[in-house]
Amino acid sequence: MVRLTRIYTRGGDTGDTSLGDGARVPKHALRVAAYGTVDEANAAIGIARLNTEGESDEM
């Protein structure tokens, strides 16, 4: 897995974004939207785990 920390493209806001492999894609691309959806789901799971800590060892 690629771990990205601070990224500066210095490309301005042309409606495109860079992926981890350096490819440029439109900000409205399905792949970019999917990354956002997965990120939001991961955050929700983290909050759920935090709020149920100690209630179940199966989580």
Image (cartoon, rainbow, N blue to C red):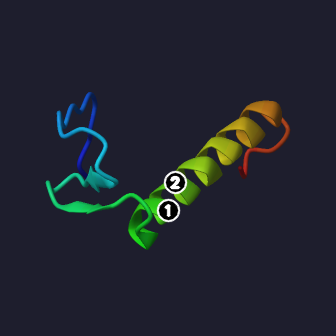
Q: Residue furthest top?
A: 6
Q: Are marks 1 and 2 in contact (CB under 8 Å)?
A: yes
Residue tagged 1:
33
The picture places residue 50, in percent across and down from the top left corner, at 73, 32
Element on which disc 2 rests: helix
Q: Residue furthest bottom?
A: 30
Element on which disc 1 rests: helix
The picture places residue 58, in percent across and down from the top left corner, at 72, 52
The local crowd at label 2, few if under 14, some if 14 to 19, many if 20 or more residues have their Cα within 10 Å, is few
Q: Relative to residue 58, is residue 23 drawn left or right?
A: left
> Between 49 and 25, which is closer to the camera in this rendering?
25
Residue tagged 2:
36
> Between 51 and 56, which is closer to the camera in this rendering?
51
User: Residue at position x 63%, y 53% from top?
Assistant: 41
Amino acid type, mark 1:
Ala
Amino acid type, mark 2:
Gly
